[in-house]
């Protein structure tokens, strides 16, 4: 599956949009914050899979039911939104 397909089928749309903040940050905000950082796709993939909190406010992102490969595909796709 492509990153966009995973975004639509794995529940990401509940909290995230490409260009506007919902519960979580927009993908454009994520890309702007992390642009140019070495290894950031792997870091984001780990956060997608395991969940996390504190980077974007008080509301935590729960762990997501994705494989490591799916998480990496999603992270790489998220980072294409400038």
Image (spheres, rainbow, N blue to C red):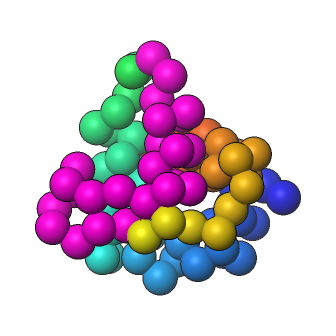
As displayed, is residue 79 above or below residue 18? above
Is 32 on the left or on the right of 16, as rendered?
left
Q: Is residue 49 magenta?
A: yes
Going by the image, does 17 lie left or right of 53? right
Residue at the farthest left position: 58
Which quadrant does the N terminus fall into?
bottom right
Residue 26 in the image: above or below residue 39:
below
Q: Quadrant of residue 12?
A: bottom right
- Return the x and y of residue 11 as percentages of the image width and height: 58, 78
In this rendering, the answer to whether 54 lies above or below 8 is above
Quadrant placement of the C terminus: top left
Farthest-out residue, bottom: 14
Which percent across, then down, holds residue 13?
A: 52, 77
Q: Is residue 37 left or right of residue 53?
A: right
Q: Position of residue 42 (x, y in %)?
A: 55, 33
Q: Which residue is outermost to the right?
A: 1
How many numbered discs, if any?
Answer: 0
Q: Judge whether residue 63 can be spotted in this image.
A: yes
Determine if residue 21 is in view: no
- Residue at 56% of width from left, 67% of height from top? 64
Question: Does 31 lie within the magenta span?
Answer: no
Res 7 → quadrant:
bottom right
Image location (x, y in percent) of residue 25: 31, 61
Magenta extent: 38-61
Kindly identify the residue that appears in the image at 50 percent across and 66 percent down. 63
Residue placed at 15% from the left, 67% from the top?
A: 58
Residue ID at (35%, 57%) = 52
């Amino acid at each position: 599956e492509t990153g966009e397909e995973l975004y639509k089928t794995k529940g990401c749309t509940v909290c995230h949009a490409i260009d506007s903040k919902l519960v979580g940050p927009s993908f454009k905000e994520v890309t702007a914050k992390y642009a140019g950082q070495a290894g950031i796709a792997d870091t984001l993939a780990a956060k997608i899979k395991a969940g996390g909190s504190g980077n974007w406010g008080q509301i935590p992102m729960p762990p997501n039911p994705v494989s490591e490969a799916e998480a990496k595909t999603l992270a790489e796709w998220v980072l294409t939104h400038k």
